[in-house]
Image (tube, coloured by chain):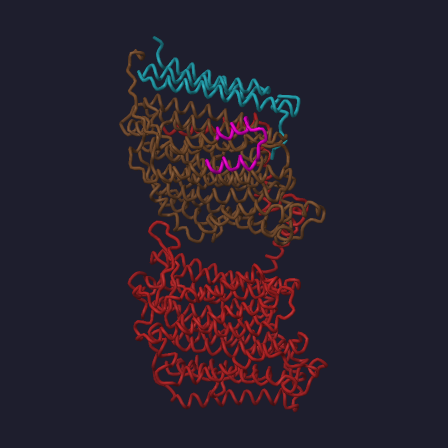
Chain colours: A cyan, B red, C brown
Amino acid sequence: MIRLPFVLLFSAFLFSAGVYGVLARRNAVMVLMAIELMLNAVNVNLVAFSSSLHDVGGQIFALFVIAVAAAEVGIGLAIVILLFRNRASINVDEVNLLKW
Amino acid sequence: MMLGPSLPEASSLSPLWLVPAVPLLGAVINLFSGRRLGRSAGWIASTSVGAAFVLSLWLVIALLERSAESRVHIQHLFDWISVGRFAVGADLRLDVLSATMILVVTGVGLLIHVYAIGYMEGDRRYGRFFAYLNLFVFFMLLLVLADNYLLLYVGWEGVGLCSYLLIGFWFEKTENASAARKAFVTTRIGDTLMLIGLALIVAGFGSLDFGAVLGAPGDTIAKGTATAISLLLFAGAIGKSAQVPLHVWLPDAMAGPTPVSALIHAATMVTAGVYLVVRSAPLFELSGVALTVVLIVGLVTALFAATCALAQDDIKRVLAYSTVSQLGFMFMAAGMRFYTGAMFMLVAHAFYKALMFLGAGSVMHGMHEETDLQRMGGLIRRMPITGWTFVVGAFALAGVFPLAGFFAKDQILEIANHTGRTWIYLLGTLGALLSALYIGRLVFLAFFGSPRSEAAEHAHESPLVMTVPLLALAAGAILAGPLLSTSAEGTLARVLEPVTGPVPHGEGLPTLALSGIATAIALGALALAWWVYASGRVEWLTLRERLQPLPRAAGSGWYVDRAYSTVFVNPGAAAARFTANVFDTKVVDGLVNGVGTGTRRLAAVGRLLQTGFVRSYALAFLLGAVGVLVWVGTRL
Amino acid sequence: MIGQAVLPTPELVFEPLLPELVLVVFAMAGLLYEALAKRTEAVVHLSIGLVGVVLAGGTSLWLWDWDGPATVLGDAVSADRFAVLARLLLLVVAALGLLLGHQYFARSGDEQRGEFTPLLLFATSGMTLIVASADLILTFLALEILSLALYVLTGLTGRRAANEAAMKYFLLGAFSSAFFLYGVAMAYGATGTTKIAAMALALTGTGEAQALAVLGFALLAVGFAFKVSAAPFHMWTPDVYQGAPTPITAFMSAATKVAAFGALIRVLDVAFQALAWDWAPVVWGLAAASVVIGSILAIAQTNVKRMLAYSSIAHAGFILTGLTAAGSAGIRAAMFYLVAYAAMTVGAFGTVMVVSGRGEKRTRIGDYTGLARTNPIAAALMTLFLLSLAGIPPTAGFIAKVNVFSAAIDAGYWVLALIGVVTSVAAAFFYLRVIVLMYMQEPEPAAPSLTEKVGIGAENSATAILAIPAAATLLLGVFPGVIVGIIRDASVLRW
C-alpha cells in the first residue's frame, strides 16, 4: 500500500503543475486545462485522505468535484468561444481593454 | 440642581417633539416645492415657525403650572446609537432653561420670518431662502432641546451649516462666498475642540446624557478633567459666539441677507455658546478655573469689540461688533456664576439687537442697499417707524431706564460689584460707556442731522410686512426688562433658579447708587454722541483725522484679521491654491487630482500594477497565497 | 472495506432548504418560458423572478422561528437565524438587481435577455445556500453555483468589455476555486470530516494534525479572500466591475460579498474557532492590505465604476477589520456592515447605471461634472451613497464603520483600527471629489445632447427603484437601532 505522504506530495506536484500552466500558457483553452489539472490534483488528495481515514465522504466529494469541473469547463469554453468571436483570437495576453 | 429624570408620564407636555418637527416640515416643503410655491413659500415658513411659537408658549405655560421642583420634562423619542455599553437616545429636555430658549428662538424667529417675506421679495431663490431659514430654526430648537451632548452637537453643527448656507446665500458675489467660508472654517476650529471635549465626557462619564454628566460631576471625575472638558466646550462656545480670538468671522458674516444677520448672527445662533456654558455650569463650577477663563474672555471681548464698533462706518458692521461685545457681557455674567443674568441679557439682547438689525435692513431697503453711515443722515424724517423703533433699540442697548438693556447690564455690573470684583466692575462700566457711545454714534449719524447723500434724501419707508415686526420687537425691547425683572414671583431669575442655582450674593455699593451711576453713564455717553455727531457743532470727520491712526486701527478690528492672514491664512491659502490649481486642471482633463502628491503618485504607480493581463493577476494571486501560507507556516 | 460500510441515511428534513428550492424552481420556470413561449415578454421574466424572490423571502422569514433541529440533512444545512438574515438581505439585493436589470435591458433596446432572470435566480440560490451551508462540500458546491452563474451574467451583453470581464472573472475564479478546494481537502485530512460542526469538535482536541488544519485554513482563506475581493486577491475586481453590465455589477458587488462573508463567518467562528489565534493575524493582514490598497488606488481612478470597485475592496477590508474580533461582537459588527454596504453599493452602482445612459457611454468621473444641474435627483442620490461609502454621518456607512472599529479595538487590534480610520479619512477625499464635481461645477457643454437624453423623464422608474437603498442608507444611519435587535438575534450561529 502506498503511504499517504507520497500521495500528498504527488498531488501537490500536480497542483503546482496546474498553477504553472495557468501562469505560463497564453492560450485560453490551455489555461482552462491547467485549471482542470489543479482540480484533479485535489481529487487525488481527497481520495487519498478518504482511504487513509476510512471515511467515504472524501470520495463522494471527489465525485462532486468532477461534476462541478465538467460544468466549469462548459461555461469556460462558452466564454472562450465568445472571446474568439469578438477578437478572432484566444490569446489571453491580447485581452487587456480593462486595466489600470 | 434639578437634573434628575422626570417620570415618563403622558402629560400635557408630550407634544414637545412637535416644536422642532414643525419647522422641519416647513423646510422640507419649501426645499422640494419652493419654486412652485412662489411668494407663499415665505408665508408657509412663517406659519410653521408661528405654530412652533404658539406650541412653545403653550408648553411653557403648562411647564410653569407645575411646582418649581418638577419643571423638567424629558421625552424619549427613540434609541439612536448603541455601540456596546454606550447608548445615546434621541431625547428632548424641556426645563426652564430650554423653555426660555425656545421662546426666544421661535418668538424672535417668527417676527424675522415675517419681516423676510418683505425683505426677500423678488429674490431668485425665494423658496430656497425660507427653506434654509426654517431648517435653521429646526436645528436651533434641536440644539436647545437636546438632552444629551451628542444631539446638542448635531444641532450645533446644523446651525453652523445653515449659517454657512445663508451667509453665502448670494454666492454669486465672491465676497459673500468667502465670508461664508470664513465663518465655517473659523467656527470649525472651536467645533473640533468641542468634539474632543465630548470625547472626554464619554471617557469620563461613559455617557453623554445631561442627567448623567451634570447631576453630580464631582463624584465621577477629577477637577482637572472637569477643567479640560469645560475649556474644550468653551472653545466651541468661543467659535460659535464669536468671542476673542475667534471673533473674526462675525463682522464678515454680515454679507448675508439682513434677516439672516438678525436671526442667526444676533438673536439665536451666536447665543448658543452662552446657552452651552449655562447648561454645562456644573462642569464649569467643578473646575473653577474654567469659570475664570470664561469671565476673562468675556470681559476682553466686550471691551475689544466695543472699541471696534466705535470706528465702523458700515451700519451692519457696527451692529456686528456690538453683538460680539454684548455676547462678551453675557459670558462675563456666566463667568461670575450669574447664569440668570447671562440668560436675562440673552433674552433682552435678542429683542433689541434683532430690532436694530431689521431696522438696518429697512434702511438698506429704503436706500438701495446703502450701508455706509457717512452717506446717511436725517433718515428719521423719511422713515419714521424704522427710525423711532431703532432709537428704542439703541437706547435699550445703551442701558437707558427702563428699557431691557438697562436691567440686563445693570444686574451684571451689580453682581460684579457685590462679589468684590472691583476691577471687573470698573472695566465693565467702561464697556457700558463705550456701548452707549457707539450706538449713540450710529443712531445720530444715520437718523439725525442732515442727509449726506442723494439716497438719504429720497429714502422711503418700508412696507407694513417689515415695519410690523419692527414695532413688535420694539415693544419687546421696552417691556422685556420690567416684565422679566420686577414682578415678584415671575422674574426670570427666580424661574431659572432650579436649573442654574441661586444668584450669588454679596455686599457692595447699594443697588440704587449703582443704577444711578449706570444711568448717568448711559445718558452722558448718548449726549456726547449727539454733541459730536448730530449737533452740527463738531466736524467729526476732522476730529477723526486728528485722532489717526487710532480710528483706522479700531476700524480694521485692531488688525487681528490681517495678523491672522499673515500667520495662518496666507500659508494655508498658498497651499490651498496649489491644490486648487492641480485640482482644477486635472478635473478638467477628467484626470486625477491630489490629496498630496505623494499619495497621488503612489496611486498612479500602484494602478499600473493593474496591467489588464489576466496572467499577471493570477501571478499576484499566487504570490498572495504563498504569502499567506508562509505567514501561517512561520507561526506553526 | 469501504464497500462494506453501511451508509447511514440521514433523516430528510427539507424545510430549511425551502428558499433555495423555490429559487431554483422559479429559475427553471424562467428557462422553460424562454424556451417554450413563442414570444417572450421581459415583464413576464421580471415577474417570474420577483415572485420567486418574494416567495423565497417568505419561506426564509418562516424559518426565523424554526424550532426543528439546528442542522438538517446530515448536518449539512444550518437552520439558524444567521442564515435567515443573510438570506433576506441577499434576496432584497436580488430583487433590486432584477428591477435594475429589467430597466437596463429595456433601455438598451437590443435583443431580449431571457437568460438574465434565471441566471440571477441561480446565482442567488447559490448565495443563499452558501450562507446556510454547514458542510464544506456544500459550501464548495454553492460557491460554484453562484460563481458559474455570475461568470455568465458578467458577459451577458457580449460586448467586448463585458466579454473580457467574464473571461478574466472566470479564469481567476476557477483558479481560486482550486485553491479553495485544496484547502477543503487539507481540512478534511486534518479532521476527518467536512462538516463544520464536527470539524470544530475535532479541532478543540489536542490535535497533532494542527499544522495540516492551519494550512487548510490558509488556503480556504485565500479562496474566500478572492470572493470578497480582499487584497492582494482583489485584482479581478476593478476589471470585472467595470466591464460587467452595471446592474449586474450592482448585484454582484453587494450579494457576492454578503454570501462570501456569510460563509467565511461560519468557517472562522465555528469550524476554526479553536484556531482563532492562528487565523486572526491572517484576517488582520488581509484587512490592512485591503483598506490601504482599496483606498489609495481609488484616488487614481477616472472611471466611476472602477472607483467604486476599489471602494468595495476597501470595504471588504473594513468588514475583515470587524471579523478580527472573534465571536459575536465581530459577527454583529460585520453583519451590520454588510447590510449597510449592500444598501449603499447597490445604490451607488444603480445611480451609475442611471447616469451612464444607453450603452454605458457616461461612466467617466468627468461625466458627473455639473450633474446637479442636469439630473438633480441622481446627483442627490449619488451624494447620499458616496457620503455613506465615505462613512460620513448621518449615513449607514458611518455607524457601520464605528461598529467594526470598536469591535477591533475591543479585541485589542487598535493598530488595525487606526489604519482603518486614517485610510477612511484619505478615502473620504475621493468620494467628496465626485460630490464637488456634481455640485460645484457647470456641466460640460461638449455633450448637451447626451445630457438631455439622460434627463429625468426616461429614468424615472430606475431612479424610483433606488429610493429603496437610499431609504435604507439613511434609516440605518439615523436609526441604526432598528436592526440592532435583529442582528443580535441572528449573530448566534447554531451547529
Front one among C65 and B128: C65
Q: With respect to residue B80, does C407 lie above or below?
A: above
Q: With respect to residue B452, does B115 lie above or below?
A: above
The x, y position of residue B84, in whole percent, is 35, 49
Left/right placement of residue B113 relative to residue C260 reads right
Front one among C338 and B582: C338
Q: Residue furthest left?
A: C205
Magenta range: C27-52
The stretch drawn in magenta includes residue B353 = no
Any part of residue B234 in sight: no
The stretch drawn in magenta includes residue C30 = yes
The x, y position of residue C195, in whole percent, is 33, 26
Any part of residue B478 in sight: yes
Front one among B458 and B157: B458
Q: Please tell me whether the stretch drawn in magenta is mainly helix, strand or loop.
A: helix
Q: Quadrant of the N terminus of chain B?
A: bottom left
Front one among C23 and C45: C45
The x, y position of residue B462, in whole percent, is 63, 79
Left/right placement of residue B297 relative to residue C34 reads left
Which image quadrant is residue C352 in? top right
At 46% from the left and 43% from the top, the residue drawn is: C419
